[in-house]
Image: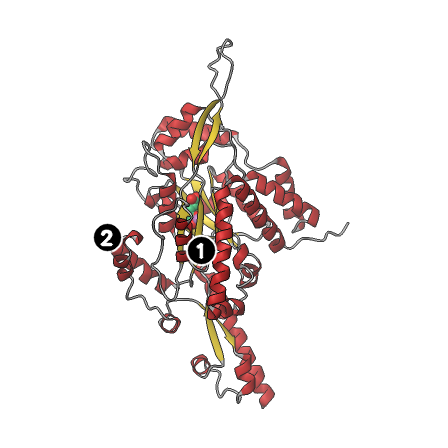
Amino acid sequence: TTSRHHAAPAKIRDAFSRAMSAMYASEVPLYGRLLSLVSHVNKTTLEQDSPLRQRLEATDDLDRIDMERHGAIRVGTPAELHSVRRVLHVMNMLPTGFYDLSAAGVPVHATCFRPHSASELSKNPFRLFVSMLQLHLITDEKLRTIVMETLARRQIFSDRMYELLDICERYGGLTDAEAEEFVQEARNSFRWHASAAVPYDDYMRLLRDNSVLADIVAFRSPHINHLTPRTLDIDAVQSDMLNQGIPLKEYIEGPPKRKCPILLRQTSFKAIEEAIEFPNENKGDPRVLPSAVSGYHTARFGEVEQRGVALTVKGRQMYDSMLQSALQDGITAAHGDAYSLKFAKFPDSWEDLRAEGLAWFQYRVDWDKLQSSETPKSDDLEYLIESGYVVYEPIVYEDFLPISAAGIFQSNLAKPGTTNGGSPKMVPCSNRREFELALGVVTMDEMILYKNIQDESLLKCRQCVQDLKLGAA
Ligand code: OOG
Ligand code: NI
């Protein structure tokens, strides 16, 4: 047998994330402008906020900021979701968490594909939000048939991609040359198509039922619908973008601005209108030449996000109940101070967040302190922290917020004269099992991942302190 040398999944992921970004910048020029604006704001923020800089350096997060992105695609069938899972698996992007968006009137459910370990995340945390149509939520039977027939006809990845997947699964990896080809094939499957796969009339029927439905079904393969760089100061990006006249959402989604950022805050520019051509149905009349019909499709947008600390189950429940109370009173992120007030009781210092078990933290020993003072008297964590031997930093939230996600879905797909993201009467129903059956694997519970990162850091601290004590004895 010949020996194969395999490219590291993180390297393939990094190449894929760069290739996607370059493609999207050329397809959606506003995204390119957003990238340079974000990189400028991040540079300024790091210059002005040296504690933040140090914290990011200490957690290995500094180098990843400028290349950090998330994107989203929407697929139509269980088989498509299954293939997407195989493709992303090559890059160590694994299904994490489950989001049922039917509760928000969008007929899809979703997961986030991302790396799991701290070291993989620090190499490149590229994440893809992948949603799948929930066919049974289409109530119009004729329309459901059109959807099923259209989706059954398409193959979203090339034959070569399936060959590469077989190779990867058989040998446990791809060579550099195969990886390069793989990245191109993967990127090409998510590119924009200026021609629709359905005739204009069908497109209009899909659109009238639900704009997400049209976006999923009307094309040959699922286009990347947005890419989102990570900023360290979303308020600065928001005001810079408005100053430059970029048509933007008026307010930032997610938790209000705080001293200690939690979860995820996001804003986006409105989806662009893109010209597409529809194949003409030549109803079998030989005298009519088949000519294309021109139209527009509105779905692709740009978005920016600021990531805060990951919350524990307890922290998340507290956040959700405050959000719930705000929404019950009709108060959203658009209401500024009134909205902030709804979250006023959520502790806003790292000390309190940690003491109350509301957020996840990464611990490390302070080597300068350990070497310059006497050996610690105990390895009790609280003692070590109080005496400055051990310090802690927030663990970044790596996932998504379904409510923001649904808000973004809706604001970007709203079109005059069409229903905005489905009927409000749509019943929420959780189909996690069905989703996982399609995937072929279960989705990881993200809380376990954060806990693992925290536990590993604590274990390392304890080992350091014990080694030191042994050395001193
Ligand atoms: C995905 C929306 C989810 C986010 O940032 O919350 C998302 C979509 O529009 O398909 O990307
Ligand atoms: Ni997004």
The residue at the point 54 percent across, 83 percent down is 370
| Residue 4 or residue 179, whichever sits in front | 179
How many numbered marks appear? 2
Q: Where residue 100 sits in the image (x, y, percent)?
A: 38, 47
Q: Quadrant of residue 202?
A: top left
Amino acid type at mark 2:
Gln
Q: Where residue 69 sits in the image (x, y, percent)?
A: 51, 52
Q: Where residue 5 sits in the image (x, y, percent)?
A: 72, 53
For disc 1, the neighbor class at 10 Å (few under 14, some 14 to 19, many from 20) is many
| Residue 430 or residue 100, whichever sits in front | 100
Q: Which mark is residue 328?
A: 2
Q: Which mark is residue 423?
A: none
- Give the mark nearest the N terminus, 2 or 1: 2
Amino acid type at mark 1:
Asp
Cα gap from disc 2 to disc 1, whole angstroms: 25 Å
Disc 1 marks which residue?
399
